[in-house]
Image (cartoon, helix red, strand yellow):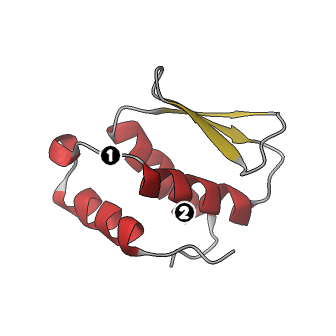
Amino acid sequence: MLPNTQHSLDKLESLLRDLGYRVRYEKGNFRTGACMLQANKMVVVNRFSNLEMKINALTGLLQGINTESDALSDKQKQFLRSIKQTKLTI
């Protein structure tokens, strides 16, 4: 489980960027705190959500996508593997 810190959020954003996704913070009515536009490889996060909701939303999105981990470093591959093996408890 990731701690609810800005550093964790930054690591998740970096991982998504390295997977080819753009991360944007916009206002909106998201039920989960974020939405993913698959065709554009873009993740839109509700900027009014608190830090915990942002981390949980990005973690949930990462668990649900099929990733090509060839472009990732070994450290990021391990981080992605640990995210995919972790169950979210909300």
Residue 66, percent across and down?
A: 32, 46
Q: Earlier in the sequence, mark 1 or mark 2?
A: 2
Q: For the point 43% across and 33% down, which residue is it? A: 21
Q: Residues within 10 Å of mark 1 (few under 14, many from 20)?
A: few
Q: For the point 33% across and 39% down, which residue is it? A: 19
Q: Quadrant of the C terminus?
A: bottom right
Q: In the image, 84: left or right of 53? A: left
Nearer to the camera, 18 or 38: 38
Q: Quadrant of residue 25?
A: top right
Separation (CA) of disc 1 from disc 2: 24 Å
Give the residue type that dot 1 points to: Asn
Q: Is residue 34 above or below residue 74?
A: above
Q: Nearer the viewer, mark 1 or mark 2?
A: 1
Residue 54, percent across and down?
A: 67, 55
Q: For the point 75% across and 42% down, which residue is it? A: 46
SS of the residue under disc 1:
loop
Nearer to the camera, 47 or 69: 69
Q: For the point 67% across and 44% down, which residue is it? A: 34
Residue that label 2 marks: 7
Residue 61, percent across and down?
A: 52, 50
Q: Is residue 40 above or below residue 78?
A: above
Q: Quadrant of residue 23?
A: top right
Residue that label 1 marks: 66
Q: In the image, 53: left or right of 22? A: right
Q: Residues within 10 Å of mark 2 (few under 14, many from 20)?
A: few
Nearer to the camera, 2 or 32: 32
Give the residue type that dot 2 points to: His
* Disc 1 and disc 2 in contact, CB within 8 angstroms: no
Q: Is residue 38 above or below residue 78?
A: above
SS of the residue under disc 2:
helix
